[in-house]
Image (cartoon, rainbow, N blue to C red):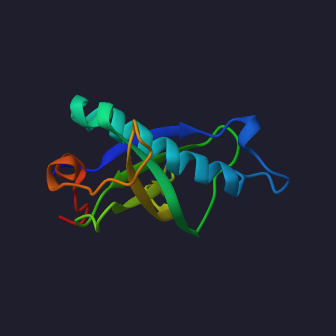
Amino acid sequence: MSEPFRKTFIAGPQHIDVMGHVNNAVWVQWVQDMATAHWDAVADPAHAAEFVWLVIRHEIDYRGNIGQGETVTGETWIPDEAKGAKSLRRVDFRNADGKIIVSAATTWAMLHRETGRLARVRPEVLAPFRSDPGE
């Protein structure tokens, strides 16, 4: 298993809502940005050419937030084997103190890029993304 993938985000003025912190819709975008960056960084080029992923479910827990100019580090991994064409991805965002402030579980479906049809996720496609941050 590999290490979780990490990416840092800075909250800009465009990310801030009327409450003075990062808007919930931005967190959803950052979850997607994490998954895309992880795929782009780790996927076998042949798999990246053949397949594309689409979100079919988001589940997000908000335990805190950040304001403009503050940073957050996202950590993403795939904890389990795929089920057919679906795979669960975990994403945690930690503030500057290292506290998890947003945690997401997203379900993604893999499709053949050319046909748009569902594709069964083979173990070799998922293997580079598997991790357990508790190890």
Residue at 32% over, 45% down: 5
Q: Where residue 51 appears, x then y in whole percent?
A: 34, 41
**Left or right side of 5 for 12:** right
Residue at 38% over, 54% down: 118
**Left or right side of 133 for 26:** right
**Left or right side of 74 for 50:** left
Look at the image and tell me whether residue 85 can be seen: yes
Q: Where residue 61 appears, x then y in whole percent?
A: 56, 70
Q: Nearer the viewer, residue 89 or 114?
A: 114
Determine the image quadrant of residue 58: bottom right
Number of marks in the rendered image: 0
Eyeballing the image, is 4 above or below 114?
below
Q: Where residue 46 appears, x then y in whole percent?
A: 22, 31
Instruction: Indicate the quadrant containing the N terminus: top left, top right, bottom left or bottom right.
Output: bottom left
**In this view, which residue lies farthest toward the front?**
115
Q: Where residue 54 appears, x then y in whole percent?
A: 48, 50
**Left or right side of 129 for 54:** right
Eyeballing the image, is 74 above or below 48?
below
Q: Nearer the viewer, residue 29 or 3?
A: 29
Residue at 31% over, 30% down: 49
